[in-house]
Amino acid sequence: MVLYGAAQFNGANVFKKISTFLQFGFYHPIRFMSKSQSMVGVNMLRLADYKAEKIQDCLHGVVKGVQEGWLDPTVGGVYPIEDLAKAHNDLGQRKTTGKVTVTW
């Protein structure tokens, strides 16, 4: 499971923070522990600020995986640059699944 959107907490008012929190739902640790599962969170903005080389290493690994065929990302949409606003809007309204690509 990949969750995103917590970056909007920066500077957001209290009602926006509560709304975002409620969209994620509630998870009790017992649900995960009984199935030997876990949930891990990473603040990518903080990671980019302090460990940019780690992100670069991960990106190289992803590109290698796609090139070698053992990683097959889901393409959620391909938009020409003229439709950049639509691509952004579709992402914001959660109308996409997978990766979104903008072509020039």
Image (cartoon, rainbow, N blue to C red):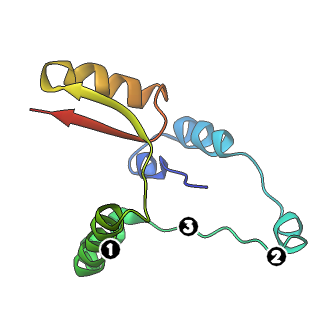
Instruction: Give the image location of residue 73, x and y in percent.
Output: 42, 51
In the rendered image, the quadrant that contains the C terminus is top left
Going from N to C along the chain, the mark reached first, 2 or 3, is: 2
Which image quarter: residue 99? top left
Q: Nearer the viewer, residue 91 or 29?
A: 91
For the residue carrying disc 1, how many other residues have a C-alpha within 10 Å: few (<14), some (14-19), or many (20+)? few
Going from N to C along the chain, the mark reached first, 1 or 2, is: 2
* Residue placed under numbered mark 2 in the picture: 36
Q: Is the Cβ of the residue at disc 2 closer than 8 Å to that at disc 3?
A: no
* Residue placed under numbered mark 3 in the picture: 41
Seen in the image, is 44 located left or right of residue 35? left
Q: Amino acid at mark 3?
A: Gly
Q: Amino acid at mark 1?
A: Gly
Instruction: Give the image location of residue 68, x and y in percent.
Output: 33, 67
For the residue carrying disc 2, how many other residues have a C-alpha within 10 Å: few (<14), some (14-19), or many (20+)? few
Which image quarter: residue 43? bottom left
Please, what secondary structure does the residue beneath circle 2 have? loop
For residue 28, above or below residue 4: below
Residue pictured at 46% horizontal, 25% vertical = 93
Marks 1 and 2, how far apart at CA:
27 Å
Instruction: Give the image location of residue 75, x and y in percent.
Output: 39, 39
For the residue carrying disc 3, how many other residues have a C-alpha within 10 Å: few (<14), some (14-19), or many (20+)? few
Residue pictured at 55% horizontal, 54% vertical = 2
Which image quarter: residue 41? bottom right
Label 1 vs label 3, nearer the camera: 1
Which label was assigned to residue 61?
1
Residue pictured at 41% horizontal, 52% vertical = 7
For residue 18, above or below residue 70: above
Label 1 vs label 2, nearer the camera: 1
For residue 17, above or below residue 84: below
